[in-house]
Image: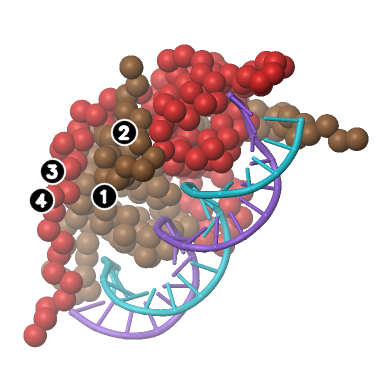
Chain colours: A brown, B red, C cyan, D purple
Amino acid sequence: MSLPFPPVAPGSDLACKCPVRDVLDRIGDRWSLLVLLVIAPKTLRFTEVKRAIGDISQRMLSQTLRTLEKDGYVLRTVYPTVPPKVEYCLTDLGRSLLARIDPLVEWANAHHDQVRQARESYVPPPAATPL
Amino acid sequence: MSLPFPPVAPGSDLACKCPVRDVLDRIGDRWSLLVLLVIAPKTLRFTEVKRAIGDISQRMLSQTLRTLEKDGYVLRTVYPTVPPKVEYCLTDLGRSLLARIDPLVEWANAHHDQVRQARESYVPPPAATPL
DNA sequence: CTGGATCCTCACCGATACTG
DNA sequence: CAGTATCGGTGAGGATCCAG
């Protein structure tokens, strides 16, 4: 089998975690990827990240940044000032990952129209022959 | 700003849909990516796809394949035989997309250990100074 | 400013049963 | 074999309040 991941027995503990799922399930969530892209160009503060994305709750941003930091993609720097100041930037690992993601972003921008067109022109197969 | 996507006003209709979100939110769901990877090497039948992934319900496989077909990534071919036979394969668009995803998969396999290690060695900042 | 704690809702998804 | 329909549990995530 040349699959990049093994089949998972339905009953098995999900902890099996093939690399593909383990890594991509994380950055595949609603916000992680956007956060990585936002802080990629330059180090940003919490509020700046929030503003750059726009629609993201404080809760989710905090949570997402924490996970990204935990996975080693993001470096969190705290300045013990008052009011507090916290900066976020990519680690080498984060930049390494993002290098593989950028082509994907470019692709999305380039082929977005094509996808939208496919959606519009799609005709669902007849569910069942009515009388 | 050199961001690959614009900020989204919190109150705004989500239909704004920048390409990045529109494309990646879809394939970023739990199953789409796995399905694409599974049918990439060769055309497969419904049951074969299901078996290859292992833990995926009939419902989600059906639903995922339908969406992928609608977005133009997957071609669905029905053979009017009995019992019915339906085959799924990638379209050119699907292969084009997958070409940008494969590097990501390779990266995941290559750096999985590094990520896992980062997670283990992570120490959360003290929540608050206890008495 | 930077979050943590709580509450609450809704969409996701699995299980099951049924059809062509 | 290849799905659709329905039901119900669960968890992601938004809103809000509070603290350092």
The crowd level at tag 4 (other Cα within 10 Å; few <14, some 14-19, many 20+) is few
> Residue A8 appears at what percent x and percent y?
35, 35
On the same chain: label 3 and label 2? no
Q: Nearer the viewer, residue D4 or C17?
A: C17
On the same chain: label 2 and label 4? no
Residue B70, by quadrant, is: top right
The numbered mark 3 sits on a residue in which chain? B
On the same chain: label 3 and label 4? yes
The crowd level at tag 2 (other Cα within 10 Å; few <14, some 14-19, many 20+) is many
Q: Which residue is mark 3?
A: B117
Element marked by disc 1: helix
Q: Which is in the foreground here, disc 2 or disc 4? A: 2
Which numbered dot is residue A68?
A: 1
Which numbered dot is residue B121?
A: 4
On the same chain: label 1 and label 3? no
The numbered mark 1 sits on a residue in which chain? A
Which numbered dot is residue A20?
A: 2
Q: Quadrant of the N terminus of chain B?
A: top left
Q: Amino acid at mark 1?
A: Leu
Q: Quadrant of the C terminus of chain B?
A: bottom left
Q: Amino acid at mark 2?
A: Val
